[in-house]
Amino acid sequence: LDKMENQEEALPLYKEALAGRRETLGDQHPDTLNSISNMAVLLDEMGNQEEALPLYKEALAARRETLGDRHPSTLTSINNMALILKQMGKKEEALPLYKESLAGFRETLGDRHP
């Protein structure tokens, strides 16, 4: 219960931070993308996958464009997309993303990275 109450209290603060970053830094700035991703994770944790999904998609698309496919933040976004798709019962869509993120992390960080 406490976690849910904290999430409900955090939601307007996340929205405010995201709006401020979009306004001052633009939609594709790395800090804005972090806020988009953080908002998606919070909504996802609150059980609102339908609202989280477009934010996960936005973060992933912008990170691919600005950081490239092998940047750790992009790979994290790929993995996050796979996770939410799996949660939503879309396992066929999730599997290629899981494979892509695993291959990318192995390529960039190696097999022994913690």
Image (cartoon, rainbow, N blue to C red):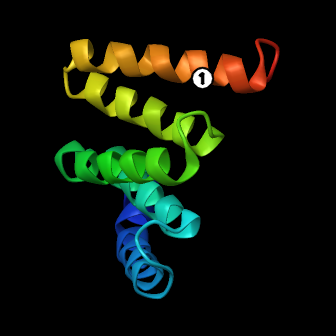
Image spot of residue 76 (x, y percent):
54, 37
77 to 7, vertically: above or below: above
Taking 18 as reference, is 23 above or below it? Answer: below
Specify whether 89 is left or right of 9: left
Please report the residue visible at 29 percent of the width from the left and 22 percent of the height from the top. Answer: 86
On screen, residue 113 versus residue 11, left or right, reads right
Q: Amino acid at mark 1?
A: Gly
User: Circle 1 — which element?
Assistant: helix
Q: Residues within 10 Å of mark 1 (few under 14, many from 20)?
A: many
Q: Residue 71 location in percent, x, y?
A: 63, 40
- Asked if one can make out residue 46 in the rendered structure from this viewpoint, the answer is no
Of 23 and 9, nearer the camera is 23
Residue 25: percent from left, percent from top = 50, 80
Percent coordinates x, y for residue 6 in the rendering: 45, 64
Q: Tell me which corner region of the image, top left, top right, bottom left or bottom right, holds residue 72.
A: top right
Give the quarter of the image for residue 89: top left
**How many numbered callouts?**
1
Which quarter of the rendering shows the C terminus?
top right
> Looking at the image, which residue is at 78% across and 17% down?
110
Give the camera-side residue of 32 and 84. 32
Quickly name the residue at label 1. Answer: 104
* Residue 110 in the figure: left or right of residue 51: right
Q: Residue at x 44, y 18 (%)?
A: 98
Q: Work out whether 76 lies above or below 12.
A: above
